[in-house]
Image (cartoon, grey):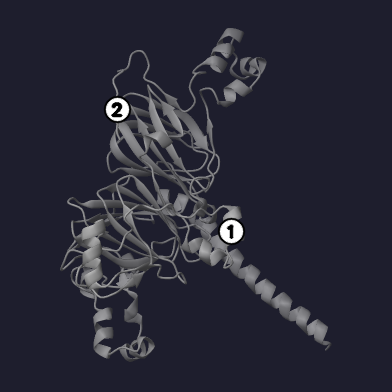
Amino acid sequence: MPTRVVLAILLCLVACGSSSQLHERRSFREEAQQCRLDRIRSLPPSRRIESEGGITELWDEAEEDFQCAGVAAIRNIIRPNCLSLPKFHSSPMLIYIEQGEGFLGLNFPGCAETYEAQSAQSSRRSSRRMGRRIGAGKEDDQHQKVRRVRRGDMIVVPAGTVQWCHNDGGQDLVAVAFLDLNNEDNQLDLRIRGSFLAGGIPREERRELRGSKNNDLVNIYNGFDQDFLAQAYNVPTDLVRRMQEERSSGLIVKCDEQMSFLTPEEEEEELSESPSRREEISNGLEETICTARVQHNMNTQREADVYSREAGRINILNQLKLPILRFMGMSAEKGHLFPNAQYNLHWSMTDHRLVYVVDGEANFQISDDYGNQVFNERVSRGNMFVIPQFYPALVQAGQEGFEWITFKTSNQPMKSPIAGYTSFFRALPLQLLEQSFQITTAEAQQLKQTRRQHTFLFPPSSGGSSSRRHRS
């Protein structure tokens, strides 16, 4: 048989096999993501894992609402001077700092250790002169960048990136993480898969936890022989044994001493991923990721994208503000409504949304694409629920206002308002409105002109309270 024919057959077999695997994967995901929701629910965490240094809460990703959107959520409560141990996840995530402050580390593969600690003597002298936080008496050290995080920060974590967090403040640090399980970077199933590089839940405790899904909260070193690891690291076997220990202290541990990290005296502007910058970098993608800006504060009022003195404000985070999101297919929105104000009736054209209530209360209604009301609840702090793509939603804040964060499965989301200055009513001819709703010309004109001075945020009606409160 001619060589050319043999090569053609082999290429065909490879292509057919790859196509079959891709088809099977897509079929699995399509089956898992069938959104047949008769009712959307505001769901509490389904699992609560108590550790020595805090609490880890997980929402059940197998719930119909979460499967429809292909998302999941985790909330970590880290007590003062405690450490959330290093780990990585199979899905990209956005982490929102709801409360407190601390240090967060992201370790990107192949990136250099660009932060260098000084010797003990020079570090003490430098600490007195410049006020830097360097642990006295420690040997020289090199590590990747450590970031200071505070309330309102949103941090982007690519799939497979090792992360850890230390609370050096005086109150609990609360971090809420949104995972996009259906993201193309995750080629496994639609489950939370967290792999720990230290600690982990002991086997006897995992058996006590409800459900077998807790088996993924383990130390990955347990899958290797001690002698094999000792050779790989060129270290004694006793040290490997310590690395493999699944400590009874759990996933968040107390620190034996106050931890401190090398951080610049002044915050330096992180490099942007603009096209011009990429052309200047010789190493291309590697250095772009190593220097990418991954952090943005959502609480800054002066950076609000939508602002109303009577209704509130909205801060949007997308690929234009944080270019790394271009490669992640994710975005977020932080909203604050004043008492009795409304967030315009609208639907999302590009993404599913996962809503987490930060503070206050609101009446929230959602309709499906068949016109059935699938959600009608008064939501409050700590509630979390899904809004599927194309499902219209309407929100009215309670007497104390309403503050929320929305995670989205698109890097450049778009929504279509149903009322206000940018609504589709204003784009339709009057006669079309008259014939569609069997109304008079005056009524059609009223529909076109209503709320024409507002876009997405509506102030309270004349019958509602005009009081409002401001937050930093």
In this rendering, the label closer to the viewer, 2 or 1: 1
Separation of marks 2 and 1 at Cα, in angstroms: 47 Å
Q: Position of residue 234 (x, y in %)?
A: 35, 89
Q: Residue at 81%, 82% (x, y): give it.
A: 5
Q: Residues within 10 Å of mark 2 (few under 14, many from 20)?
A: many
SS label for mark 1: helix
Please tell me which of labels 2 and 1 falls first in the chain.
1
Judged from this view, the residue extending furthest toward the right is 2
Residue 466 rendering spot, x and y as whole percentages: 31, 17
**Taking the image as drawn, is residue 167 in sight?**
no
Instruction: Write down the quadrant of residue 440 in the picture.
Output: top right
- The quadrant of the picture occupied by the C terminus is top left
Three-letter residue code for mark 2: Gly
Residue found 53% across the figure and 42% down from its top: 413
Residue 427 located left or right of residue 206: right
Taking 158 as reference, is 38 above or below it?
above
SS of the residue at dot 2?
A: strand
Q: Nearer the viewer, residue 252 or 215?
A: 252
- Residue 393 place in picture, x, y as percent: 45, 33
Q: Nearer the viewer, residue 135 or 147?
A: 135
Is residue 48 or residue 199 the one in the foreground?
199
Q: What residue sits right under mark 2 in the picture?
A: 398
Crowding near the residue tagged with mark 1, few <14, some 14–19, many ≥20 C-alpha atoms within 10 Å: some
Image height of 461 relative to 224, above or below: above
Q: Which residue is mark 1?
A: 278
Tell me which amino acid carries mark 1: Arg
Q: Quadrant of residue 80?
A: bottom left
391 vs 76: above or below: above
Q: Is residue 191 visible?
A: yes
